[in-house]
Amino acid sequence: MFGKLSKQTVYSIIVLGFLAIGAFFMVNVELPRWSHYLSAINVVLFSLPSFWAVRWWLGWRDAAILLLALGLYALLIEASAILTGFPYGHFGYSDLLGFRIYGLVPWTVAFAWTPLILGSYGIAANLFADRILRIFASTLIVTLFDVVLDPGAVLLGFWHYKEGGWFYGVPMSNFAGWLVSGFIGTVLIELLVVKFKPLLPTPVQLALSAIFIVFFWAAIAFFGSLYLSAVIGLLSFAGLVYLFFRHHYSFDDKIVFVDENAIPIGTGDKLPSHTGDTRLHRAFSIFLFNSKGEFLLQQRALSKKTWPGVWSNSCCGHVKLHESYERAAKRRLKQELGLSGIELMLMLPDFKYRAEKDGIVENEICPVFVGFTDNVPVPNPDEVEAVEWVDWSGFVALLDDPETQISPWAVLEARELLSLQEFRTAVSNAGVR
């Protein structure tokens, strides 16, 4: 049934099923006194997918600054509404969303509102290049999210409006307030993005949390007979899913261009970026040995754009932005060869090369790692055509063969490794001759 679906899609379908079941019970079963603990945990869990996307988009430091700024803003503007009525009108929170700071705003608001504004911005940024259009689109989208969320929250008693309201107990002033807070929140994101100057395009993955949140509250609206809100929610959910798949890109599919000092200066799509004049970018290589003293050779998949079918060192790959070389190497070992738990030693931190074949150039700053394992590789057929454990001395003999079929970077890397006393000692201790 799920043969043609990716694991991520299957997992998402399973999560949506659990959310629908959870929504049913929340509407039809009286919430226990301890439910505020569970509600707080759920709010945080909902926020994690978008927070993960921000981390890969901006890096840890800038992501923390953005999330902290948005979280504090959410708490302040909610406190303003409770104390003054601006911008949402007069309302109050129950205790169901966790501890209220100074008796006013639950701490979870910072985790509940932030992924919604991030999601609306992520969608708007992928639809509009013009900043003004992007700001207004994001403002409207996040307000639409509230049309789905707020009626269900009132139904469950998470908060209430003192004078009620025409839309399932929600007043028009609330939606007008979301236009105000959404506008300010989007402008705040824009200002920080201008400051941070991210090298990656705005990822639509910022809307991951919003997709699940909108579905969950649409389900609550449906089971709570708030049918207009439910219809708006399900249509919004469908639109979000469509836009996600239309504009989604993988962080792993972006290579990182660098200057001569290995400082990132830009990013590009992996395949189109490899041309006859490929720009210098970040990569890595791995040499694996086993306890028999053998070296793992890999034949690159025939479908590869660069050096298809060529035999090379154990594993190679590119480094994602905001990712360390070692983490990238371990990630790629798992993806290409199904190997994990291998301790890697950085032997050539500054290795750099340029090579050309069939009009395609590789131009990389490519640190070289060495590792040892007796685990059996499980090659990914999309990346690897074949693997073979070979005698190291036999492989070394191929380096000087003018007709060698080994990749040019593996030849250069092996020669430099052989010149290192640290490498010779490490492999000798492992029984490599």
Image (cartoon, rainbow, N blue to C red):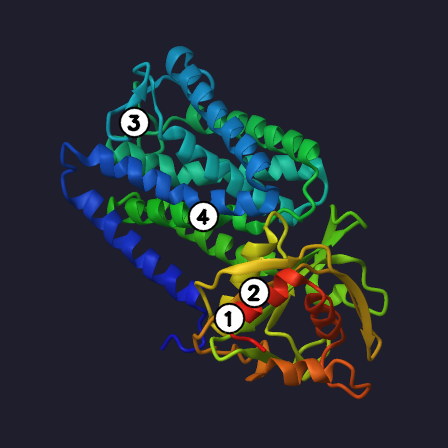
**Above or below 173: residue 352:** below
Name the residue tied to disc 3.
159
In this view, the residue in front, 392 or 129, is 392
Name the residue tied to disc 1.
430
* Between discs 2 and 4, the one toward the N terminus: 4
Q: For residue 303, what is the image quadrant?
A: bottom right
Disc 1 packing (10 Å; few <14; some 14–19; many ≥20): some
Check residue 30 in the rendering and tell me which mark sits there, or answer none: none
Residue 93: % across, % down = 30, 23
Disc 3 packing (10 Å; few <14; some 14–19; many ≥20): some
3 or 1: mark nearer the eye: 1
Q: Give the farthest residue toward the top.
A: 84
Q: Are marks 1 and 2 in contact (CB under 8 Å)?
A: yes
**Residue 116 shown left or right of residue 409 in the figure:** left
* Between discs 3 and 1, the one toward the N terminus: 3
Q: Are marks 2 and 4 in contact (CB under 8 Å)?
A: no
Quadrant, the N terminus: bottom left
Residue 32: % across, % down = 14, 36
Task: Work out how far the residue at label 1 is from the one at label 2, CA to CA, in angstroms.
Answer: 6 Å
* SS under mark 1: loop
Task: Work out how far the residue at label 3 is from the one at label 2, CA to CA, in angstroms.
Answer: 64 Å
* Between discs 3 and 4, the one toward the N terminus: 4
Task: Work out how far the residue at label 4 is from the one at label 1, CA to CA, in angstroms.
Answer: 42 Å
Task: Work out how far the residue at label 2 is from the one at label 4, CA to CA, in angstroms.
Answer: 41 Å
Seen at 40% across and 35% down, the residue is 112
Seen at 59% across and 76% down, the residue is 383
Name the residue tied to disc 2.
426
Name the residue tied to disc 4.
49
